[in-house]
Each structure stands twice: as C-alpha cells, then as structure tokens.
Amino acid sequence: MPNHAQRLEFPNPLPHIRAPRGENPGIVAGYFRDQAEANRGAAKAKMAKKLFIKSYGCQMNVYDSGRMADVLTPLGYESVDAPEAADMVILNTCHIREKAAEKVYSELGRLKQMKADKDDMIIAVAGCVAQAEGQEILNRAPVVDMVFGPQSYHRLPDMIAKLEGGAKNILDTDFPVEDKFDALPKVGGAGKGKGAPAAFLTVQEGCDKFCTFCVVPYTRGAEFSRPVEKVLAEARALAESGTREVTLLGQNVNAYHGEAAGGATWGLAELITALADIEGLDRIRYTTSHPRDMDDALIAAHGDVEKLMPYLHLPVQAGSDKVLKAMNRQHTADGYRALVTRIRAARPDLAMSSDFIVGFPGETDEDFEQTLQLVRDIGYAQCFSFKYSPRPGTPGADMKDQVPEDVKAERLARLQALLNEQAASFHASMVGRELDVLFEKPGRHEGQIIGRSPYLQAVHAKAPASLIGQIGRVRIIKAKTNSLEGELIAPGVREVA
Ligand code: 5AD
Ligand code: SF4
C-alpha cells in the first residue's frame, strides 16, 4: 500500500502507546464523579466562563466537541448557543470536502469583528483543517489564539494556561504518544443531569487504508483502537446516566482491534456482544465501516445480537471496478454485492446506507452507469453522495483526467434522484408497521416528541415529554420526505430508573 504521508507538509502519525489495563471501572467512575463535582464546585466559585463550539463535518467531530466541553468544565467553562455570548469560541473543523478551509477563514472573519468588542475572547481552531493547515491558520488569521488537531485537544487546559501566562498563537498539531482518552474526564457521570438518550462513543480512530481521494489518514493519523475495558467503562457510565443507545464511532470502526483482558485482542463483534450485556443500554450502532473489514463474526453479530440495530452504513463510493481500483478501495463492486447478500442473510430486514463519490478522476459515463446499477441492485435506505473534490496532498488530486465540474454536477443530480427515490420507497414501506422508537427530544409542534426507529429514521408522534429517553411502540401512519409520523401504542418497553 502506498504511503502518501511523505508527500505532505504536516507530520506523519506516530503509533499510539496503548493505555494500561486492569482498572476497576466502578471505582474509576465513582472517583471521577466525586472529582468532577469537586472541580465543578471550585470552578463555579471562581467564575463561570462561556464556551461556544461550532462543530463541522462528521459525527466524530460532534463527539470530540462534547469531549472538549468536558475537558473545559473543570476550568469553569459552560456551553452557550451563540458565539456572541462566549469567552471562548472553538471551530471544530472538517477537511474532507471542498472549501472547508475557506469556510473556516470566513467564519474567522466574523469572529474577528466580535473579538474587536471583546478583547479577552479566546478563538481556537480545532479538528482536521487545523491539523492540515497548522501554522498557515495563524499566519493568515492572527486573530486566532490556538490551533490544535483532533489528537491533542486533551491538552486544552495546558494551552489555556499558556495563553493566560502571556503566550500567543499556540500551535499543537502533534500526534502525541499518550492516549488522549486517558487524559479526558470520564463521560456521563452524575451531576451532569440525565445523559442524552442516544450518545456517540469513539472506539477507534484513524485510518490506514489510504483511499486516494481521502484526507483522513493524514489528519486523524494511524488506526488506533481503544482498549476494551475503557470502552465498556464509558458505555456503562453512559447507561447509568440514562443513555439508551450508543453509536460506536471510528473512521474505520469495523477494523476495531482492542486490547482485552489477558492480552487478547477483540474485534468489533466481540465488543458489541459485551456491550449488549450492559443493563440499560438497549441499542447499539456503529459507523463508519469499510467493506474489507466486515468479517464473519461481525456479520454473524447482525443476526445474533438483538440490540444491534438493523441499519448499516457501509460506504461503497462507486460501482465501477476501474474507479474502485483507482480509488484504492481494495474491493470490487461484485465483492460488495456478495457481502451485502451475506449480511442480509444474517439480518434480513437490514437497512443499508452508503457514501458515494461521483466524478472521481477518469470516471466515464459508463463507469457512472455502473454506480447507478449498483444502487439499483442493493436498494438503499439512505445515502450520502458527493462530487469528487481534490484534496491537496492526496494522490487523487494529481491524477490525470479530472472530471469537469458540470459533468460531476449532472451525475450527482442523477444519482441523488435515484437515491431519493429509494429512500422515499423505504420510508413508505414503513406505513402501517409498528416500530420501537427511542424518543430523544421535543418535536417542533406542541405535544409532539421525536425519536429514531431501529432503521435510524426520524419518527415523530404525539406523546408526553416524559417519554423522552424511553422506547415506545409506535404505529407509523405517514411517511414524509425526511421523517415518519406515528401514533404511540404502548410507552416504555422498559422503564429507566
Ligand atoms: N471528495 C468527495 N467526497 C469525499 N469523501 C471523502 N473524501 C472526499 C473527497 N475528496 C466522502 C466519501 C467518504 C465521506 C465521509 O466523504 O464518500 O465516505
Ligand atoms: Fe478515508 Fe474511509 Fe478510505 Fe480511510 S477508508 S481513507 S477514512 S474513505
């Protein structure tokens, strides 16, 4: 596999050092709860400071933003909804597609004006644009106080201390040898109020696949799996705080290979099976997966583990073997078809999801037709589709035969028309069915609450707000473009203590 990292200006990922094993999670959770409360008390006594984090891009950025807030809580920071009210603004950026950096610079322009009225406002750029652009951000936008990457945000307290000590323009885009998760406070402890009904949990980070269009291996670093016990402890803490559903996150989540007790290594299937034993945790999902890492055990888990939801995001990107090869995807279109057939044999009602890129260099009309054919063959519930955007430093950016923008746009429109048709018919097939819905929040209309079906569809129903955080049985009466409407049949499959 080519190592493209040498061609980039920013440092290559270092392998992470694995965290020590053998902690008693119960004791750890208790300790952190006490500690977090003590910290919170002390911080409040100092003075509450306001924090605004804007999260761009993927779900892992959403998770990371939450963890940044956790790290800043002991320092007296409380989250607010708008940058105007904030003492610190963090832009947690995404670099995966077009104009990401430009968006960040224009946001920084707006923040510069805000800072003009509020001199001590701290402005930070985090995430993958920070990792990729590094010093360039500080050069182009001197209003920025701190730039740090996805692997170094646990050092935020140190960075802030340095700023307070008079340092300027802090840059931390290292791939540190320590495990950032060990340095973060534990999630979901008491004192934070009830946990979100559905939460993310990062179990794996980074990617060694080097698809030729993708910037992730450079910005997130090498593949790293969190040790099993750490993941289970975080999941237990979430469940104790009222979380009923976890989505296991990783750029290559099904490549998970976490260190387990006795020196064993667990794959994702074993991890999911162990998570399914956690009392109070009723639903498990995982994203994002690579077709090459769907092993037999994981396929079997889709049939055996009831709590594993029947929805799988398994990006294929394209339907032409020639394009897949140029993308360095290391699977063929027929290989993907056969894989989906096997997973559906294990779980017949599995709803499939994928990402697609149209207009990758060299893609012809015929190649694109093969993508449409693959979509027809699989039948998707919901998908994400993008025009290819050359990412500086990735091999695709230098390939010949770049596809003109108007051709990409036309192909994308055709693909999306087909995907929308499939999504609509998938939604429509739910009408008249009874589904379990995990209610997550109030709806837009009075008396309405919203949750998710097992197939990840948004479902709203008239029901008391007290059902938020519980699973209710709902009869679907109407399919809309992006959601389903249902009637509550029986609330609370199981009460939450
Ligand atoms: N251009 C367009 N889409 C991209 N993706 C990743 N890199 C690019 C790129 N350079 C898409 C892929 C991936 C999803 C998260 O973003 O489809 O699966
Ligand atoms: Fe990017 Fe996913 Fe390919 Fe890794 S497997 S390089 S994250 S598209």
Image (spheres, helix red, strand yellow):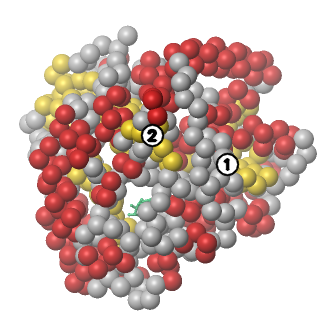
Mark 2: few/some/many CA within 10 Å (<14, 14-19, 20+): many
Q: Report the image quarter containing ligand 2.
A: bottom left
Badge number at residue 176: 1
**Which quarter of the image is occupied by the N terminus?**
bottom left
Q: Quadrant of residue 339?
A: bottom left
Q: Nearer the viewer, mark 1 or mark 2?
A: 2
Mark 1: few/some/many CA within 10 Å (<14, 14-19, 20+): some
**Which is nearer the N-term, disc 1 or disc 2?**
1
**Residue at image x 73%, y 67%?**
136
Residue type at mark 2? Answer: Gly
Nearer-the-camera pick, 310 or 69: 310
Q: Position of residue 482 (x, y in %)?
A: 27, 48
Q: Is residue 365 visible?
A: yes
Q: Position of residue 497 (x, y in %)?
A: 37, 10
**Which residue occupies the extreme front position in the image?**
262
Q: Quadrant of residue 328?
A: bottom left
Q: Whole-Å distance between the Cαs marked 1 and 2?
A: 19 Å
Nearer-the-camera pick, 276 or 489: 276
In this picture, is 402 found above or below 152? Answer: below
Q: Position of residue 424 (x, y in %)?
A: 18, 54
Badge number at residue 258: 2
**Residue at image x 48%, y 57%?**
207
Left or right for 134, reference 259: right
